[in-house]
Image (tube, grey):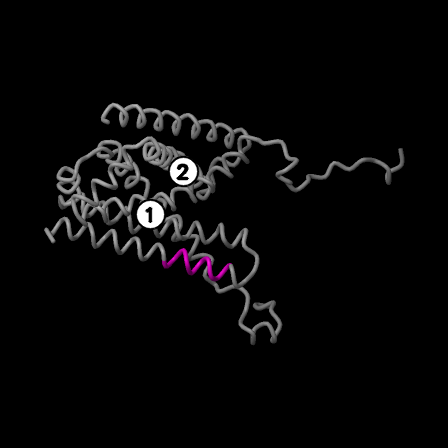
Amino acid sequence: MSVANRPVHRPLSPHLQVYRPQLTSVLSILHRATGIALSVGALYLATWVIYAAASPKAYALFQSFNMSIAGRIVLGGWLFCAFYHLCNGIRHLFWDAGYGFELKDAYRSGWIVVAVSAIATAVSWIVGLRLV
Amino acid sequence: MSDLRTPLARARGLGSARDGLHHWWAQRLTAIALIPLVVWFAISLVMLSGADYDIARAWIGSPLVMVLLILTIAVGLHHGQLGLQVVIEDYVHGDGWKLALIVAVRFVAVVFGLAAIVAILRIGFGG
């Protein structure tokens, strides 16, 4: 085989449509997605104190949605996003400080983030449901 | 050579606003501040998600909670606004839309943040 015909194995830029998902890329995308969801959810939570300041009637209206199944899903989803973004954000801060860039370390820290945020979410859902 | 831009590019004044480091640094500082605040807020949210009017107001209006809540809202919305700006800059390519969305995100964050802070102060100071 001549040099010109030899296949070259250059790294390709990740076209997400045809790229096999890896833990690292999925967690990276999830960090952005949860960040956007948290921002929108923060506005929802801000209205909580606004309703509490308004009147008992307004607050009761807001709480009736909070206690509905849709409201539980919003709150539960926000808690998952918060725990995941918190854990993965700490992982990002370690990278910013220059630690954990080896592939092995990136995967290990990634799985730690998955485990810790899953446990925290599960505990918050169980405790939250029991209180309701 | 200290400046690689042409005289014309300099005269037009486009290009880096020399704001990148400040943005990056502010995002990290708010992130660090939010670690304890979000842990506290998430626990409080679970404990109080079903609270009635009087319990919720008594909690919001206690001095320590007022301070922590205002900090969480102000720092959280600032952090969110910085993050959304990066997302918008990455995916919105038209200059007009990009600027309009970044400005809109900032306005919404300030309006909701201020409204929430006023509400907390009103509850705390018995308005």
Q: Quadrant of residue A12?
A: top right
Give me the disc on residue A85. 2
- Magenta region's main secondary structure? helix
What residue is pinned by disc 1? Answer: A43
Q: Is residue A78 left or right of residue A47?
A: right
Q: Which residues are magenta?
A: B98-107
Q: Is residue A34 left or right of residue A7?
A: left
Residue plotted at (45% across, 56% down) = B21
* Chain holding disc 1: A
Picture coordinates of residue B91, whole percent (x, y): 54, 51
Picture coordinates of residue B6, whole percent (x, y): 62, 72
Q: Earlier in the sequence, mark 1 or mark 2?
A: 1
Q: Quadrant of residue A81?
A: top left
The residue closer to the viewer here, A87 or A118, is A118
Could you tell me which quadrant the C terminus of chain A lies in?
A: top left
Residue plotted at (32% across, 32% down) = A72
* Chain holding disc 2: A
The verdict on residue A34 being magenta is no
The residue closer to the viewer here, B12 or B55, is B55
Give me the disc on residue B41. none
Residue plotted at (13% across, 43% down) = B62
Q: Quadrant of residue A44?
A: top left
Q: Are marks 1 and 2 in contact (CB under 8 Å)?
A: no
